[in-house]
Image: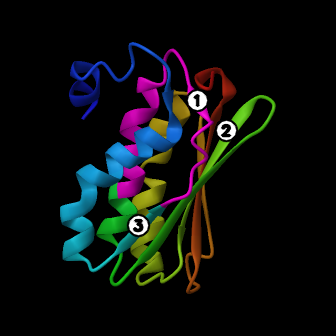
Amino acid sequence: MEEMYMAAGAFTAPISLNQLIKNLVDHSLPAAFQHHTRIVNEVDRELILGPGAEQLLDVLDELLEAVIRNSKEGDIHITADRYRDMVLLQIEERNNYNGYALSFSVGSIEPDAAKIGGHISIEGARKRQATISFSFPGQFAA
């Protein structure tokens, strides 16, 4: 996955997190279509990622893939906020179908997030609306 973006020159200059998410969503559309899942990218276009942001790519891709894979007629909304020294990306599944499987899949990604100084958590895994939070160091944001 990373090679696709590096080859396209996506990380030779700053890129908005919105654009990065859009690229990942576009790549995931066949799976989303198969699961009858809608994905809405609500990330602010002005949240810019700087040098080293390619380290986020694998975790973001795995998270999106896990949510889609465990969805059925899903309604996924992606948002992000920048705080002083961190960025918080949230993937909200508003039609949570299989919370146990989703929780297990998301938990398996946590070690990858930790390697880059990030953290993943899930709230509401057993409820209709589940929210996966991925916080990562603000150093990746420009």
Does residue 87 appear left or right of residue 93 in this picture?
right
Q: Judge from the rendering whether residue 133 lies leftward or rightward of residue 66; answer left or right.
A: right
Residue situated furthest right in the rendering: 84
Q: Residues within 10 Å of mark 1 (few under 14, many from 20)?
A: some
Q: CA distance from mark 1 to mark 2?
A: 11 Å
- Give the CA separation, mark 3 to mark 1: 21 Å
**Sequence-earlier tag: 1 or 2:** 1
Residue 20 sits in quarter: top left
Q: Which residue position holds label 1?
A: 48
Question: Mark 3 packing: few (<14 Cα in 10 Å), some, or many (20+)?
Answer: many
Q: Position of residue 122 (x, y in %)?
A: 59, 63
Could you tell me the amino acid type at mark 3?
Ile
Q: Is residue 67 above or below residue 71?
A: above
Q: Residue at x 53, y 27 (%)?
A: 116
In the rendered view, how is the structure colored? rainbow
Residue that numbered label 2 is attached to:
87
Whether 58 is among the magenta residues is: yes
Q: Earlier in the sequence, mark 2 or mark 3?
A: 3
Q: Is residue 67 magenta?
A: no
Q: Is residue 36 above or below residue 109?
A: below
In this picture, which residue range is highlighted in magenta? Answer: 41-64
In the foreground, 46 or 4: 46
Q: Which disc, if any, is residue 39?
A: 3
